[in-house]
Amino acid sequence: MSRSSSAIILLSASTSAKPLLNLNLNLNPLIIDINIILSSKMNMRRRRNSVAVSGLQLQQLGVAGMGVVGAAPTQSQSQSQSDSHIVVHDDLDALLRILPCDLRDNLLNEPKIAQLLEVILDLGCYPEARYLDEFRRHYLRNTKVSMKELEHAQNAVGEFGGDNRAGIEGTLHRISAIRSTKGMIVGLTCRVGRAVSGHVDMIYDLLQYGKSILFVGKPGVGKTTVMREIARVLADEFHKRVVIVDTSNEIGGDGNIPHSAIGGARRMQVPDSSMQHAVMIEAVENHMPEVIMVDEIGTEAEAHACRSIAERGVMLIGTAHGQRLENIIKNPILSDLVGGVETVTLGDGEARTRNSQKIVLERQAPPAFHFLIEMRDRHYWVTHQTQKSVDILLRGKNPQVEVRKRNEKFKVVIEKSKAYDKCDP
């Protein structure tokens, strides 16, 4: 029986480019041999490091143990079912170019560069790097950020939108600005955008139903990454007409040409975040989509737009602010997504039958989303049939849910009919 092994290849935006990182993993222990090849604009510098990471760290990257469409199988893959071949599109060199040269060099010498989450540049403060699931501060040098350095980064990025976000054309990176009371940029959050293939196998079976799905979860858990891959799968494998309403260019990346990670899905950009609901309706009326995808549903108008789209029979894939289903039910702005809540006065007989008070809360209408998935972490998802779960929760009871998670071999395991209050990653 063959030993479990994996291979991870990090590619640049161009499919013809050579891998930026070639990680050969031997899982006993996990020793990664890293070859970093930078572009000619960065003097074609070549570095070689050897670092050890845990299986947990691979899960945090969101790439462990997941198959990729278009990746050629290795010899070991044909010998063992636990083998994997992962492709991660990571245009990290494009992000590093906007940073001061010394910070760029420091990051390139960092063994954990593959886990880089974001770089923080605040005027008058030490520049800081943040890594996946690490909470201590990593300062990149002992001198503080100057206004000149912020201006250089701002010029390299270009114009910021009304939401103080910008991107780097052709990539998934996001640059967010902090402004002074006079409108001057005094801080930048440079977040790494990665297109990670493999998340969709957690819910591939649900996509076949053609029902709407809402994702909730804390920031950074991977909701947008999942949305991006679902768009590609629905467009390229299910051959659906998919339109992405991309308010901050987080799903399709910056620039007029969307990132290849969304496959054949179409992308409609939104000039201002306050117009997201209008663009959602415009997409349905003008472009005949079978699927609408929208990230960060957060206003009453957007919730009403979702209901309107659902009533037209269009499949919706979305994310919303909140960590649990209860957060959405109790949020008067977003409760429409799960059917809304109204106060009902029961008759004496009905109250006795239910063993409840006469005044109760009930679901007002059919939910806009058939399924709601709580992403507790990157590899532990709690799946609700929205209508059933909402009705049971409003009666003060615990619904039965489906838990989707990865085991120690990173295979997807589905636990059916699990008590909601017993779900814990």
Image (cartoon, grey):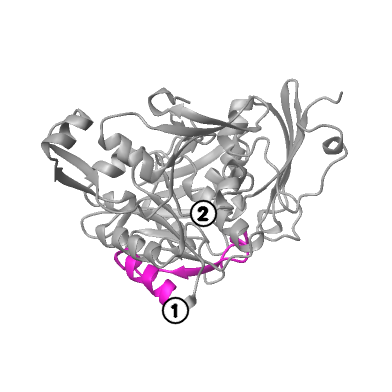
Residue at disc 2, secondary structure: loop
Question: Which residue is pictured at 33% across the width and 49% down the height?
Answer: 338
- Numbered disc in front, either 1 or 2: 1
User: Which residue in the rendered view is the most extreme toward the front?
Assistant: 349
Determine which residue is flagged by label 1. 286
- Which residues fall within the magenta stretch? 258-286
201 sits left or right of 401 in the view: right
Label 1, residues with CA under 10 Å away: few <14, some 14-19, many ≥20: few
- Quadrant of the drawing holding the N terminus: top right
Badge number at residue 173 = 2
Verify whether residue 209 appears in magenta: no
Label 2, residues with CA under 10 Å away: few <14, some 14-19, many ≥20: many
The amino acid type, in three-letter code, at marker 1 is Asn
105 sits left or right of 136 in the view: right
Question: Which residue is pictured at 55% across the width and 53% down the height?
Answer: 209
Q: Earlier in the sequence, mark 1 or mark 2?
A: 2
Question: Which residue is pictured at 44% across the width and 79% down the height?
Answer: 286
167 sits left or right of 115 in the view: left
The amino acid type, in three-letter code, at marker 2 is His
Residue 176: image x %, image y %? 39, 53
Whether residue 160 is visible here, answered yes or no, is no
Please tell me whether residue 167 is drawn above or below residue 195 in the rendered image: below
Question: Would you identify the image quadrant in which residue 8 lies?
Answer: top right
Q: Viewer-proximal residue, 31 or 239?
A: 239
Question: Which residue is pictured at 69% across the width and 61% down the height?
Answer: 14
Question: Would you identify the image quadrant in which residue 127 lies?
Answer: top left
Residue at disc 1, secondary structure: helix
